[in-house]
Amino acid sequence: MKVYKFGGGVLKDASNMRQLIPLMKKENGPLVVVVSAFGKTTNALEKVAENYYEKTGRAAMILSDIRKLHDEMAQELFPGREDEAFSQLSGVFGSLETFMALAPRGSFNRIYDRIVSCGEMLSSLLVSAWLNRNGILNRWIDIRECLLTDDCYRDGKIQWAVSEERVKNVFLRENDGISVTQGFLGATADGHPVTLGREGSDYTAAVLAAMLDAEKVVIWKDVPGVMNADPQWMDTGEKLEEISYLEAVELSYYGAKIIHPKTIKPLENKKIPLYVKPFANPEAPGTLIHQIQRKMDLVPVYIRKENQVLITVLPRDYSFVVEESLGKIFSLFNRYRLRVNLVQNSAISISLCVDGRKDKVEKILAGLQKEFNVKYNTGLELITIRHYTPEAIARVLDGKTVMIEQRTRGTVYFLLKA
Ligand code: ASP
Ligand code: MG
């Protein structure tokens, strides 16, 4: 069993959908194909959710643009409109429109998941139909019936044991074939869709691979492999041939966008290798992430996280930030599931750098302000360099103001005012 994951960056237009055919023609299975939403659909659906929830009157219009894009793609792929895919797409849009015809009820996050989950439903239906049309016979599987999560909407936690049983039952039923399913999604026990965190399709691929004891996972990308910097930020042109699970965890933890941070653990547990390969050149080696014991000489790897917030907490009486206060502070971040990217403490304060998730940050600030004096700065960037050199540091600092700097033997972090 192999697991292939195609992201929105590669599944973005009819021409790439055509390129999928020669790549998939070589596969006879058993193979699980995990897809995320086409192109920027998830971002657009987020806008639909926000506008619907805030009753701006614009939600239907944004949704109709999304519908138009999917329709155009379907028409290009299936001229004559006779394919079943059309009625399937219509079904997804129709039920969403029915849902949105009523006034919003319940929490925003729950509504978000109902709306945003449609992106993967649409893309998987279209990919499955397109492969079938081209003789690559496959089963479409509704992952919401397999991956059971808790009800932490937008950040669902998979209930492993039940999910594993369902996944095995469903995916191993016709063991030698190809299945097409959705990344990024699961559902609560009562069937409400739950998303697994933005960019979560890689994680889905890893989870399915682990549950099915796959021999490997391939993430098909629009880049040659894992680069040592995000090419859209800093074009170094350097690709990493091979990295260990540990290195990959470090890279994704600090925000390397190439793979979702949660992806590695399920694979590492079962020692399943992960390939990141270029969709445009399937024969190229890409990057291999696997178990490596030997010591490796690695080039500097640059990671940038934008939109960071630095929160500085000072006890009212200027006492040291003792363990008790620290516990309280961290439990607030934990309650709102906001990860702390960097911590710096001094005699009278503790500073924490977190992602600028406005919804969560506001709640945390309100909580902290009840007991402490709090200061904060927004719009910062956190740069991490693994395997740093003096030249690598000079390259990123270039005229910027450093708010916090931390170094370990292998890694340096700079919190910068952009
Ligand atoms: N479509 C989702 C997102 O854009 C999941 C993914 O792409 O992995 O966040
Ligand atoms: Mg996506």
Image (cartoon, grey):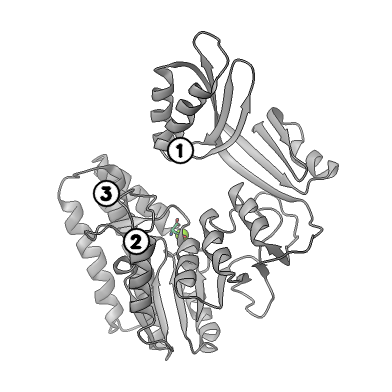
Mark 3 highlights which residue? Answer: 111
Residue at image coords 31%, 71%: 142
How many neighbours does mark 1 have within 10 angstroms: few (below 14), some (14-19), or many (20 or more)? few
Q: Can the viewer see residue 295 in this picture?
A: yes
Q: In x, y percent, where is residue 73? A: 39, 72
The part of the image, by quadrant, that contains residue 124 is bottom left
Q: Nearer the viewer, residue 64 or 229?
A: 229
Residue ranking furthest to the left = 102
Q: Position of residue 109 (x, y in %)?
A: 31, 45
Give the quarter of the figure containing the C terminus.
top right
Amino acid tagged 1: Arg
Q: Can you identify the residue that label 2 sits on?
A: 186
From the top left corner, tell me how far across and down residue 226 is, in percent.
66, 62
In this orientation, which residue lies closer to the viewer: 138 or 293?
A: 293
Q: Position of residue 136 (x, y in %)?
A: 43, 88
Residue 357 is labelled as 1
345 to the left or right of 55: right
Q: Nearer the viewer, mark 2 or mark 3?
A: 2
Which quadrant of the structure image shows residue 204? Answer: bottom left
Locate ligand 1 by image quadrant: bottom left
Q: Amino acid at mark 3?
A: Ile
Q: Residue 75 lies in what quarter of the image?
A: bottom left
**Tag 2: residue type?**
Gly
Look at the numbered disc 3 and give the secondary structure of its residue.
helix
| Vertical relation: 347 (above or below) 300 | above
Q: Secondary structure at mark 1?
A: loop
Q: Residues within 10 Å of mark 3 (few under 14, many from 20)?
A: many
Residue at 73%, 67% in the rendered image: 241
Which one is in front, 211 or 78?
211
Q: Is the CB of mark 2 within 8 Å of ligand 1?
A: no
Q: Is residue 26 left or right of residue 32?
A: right
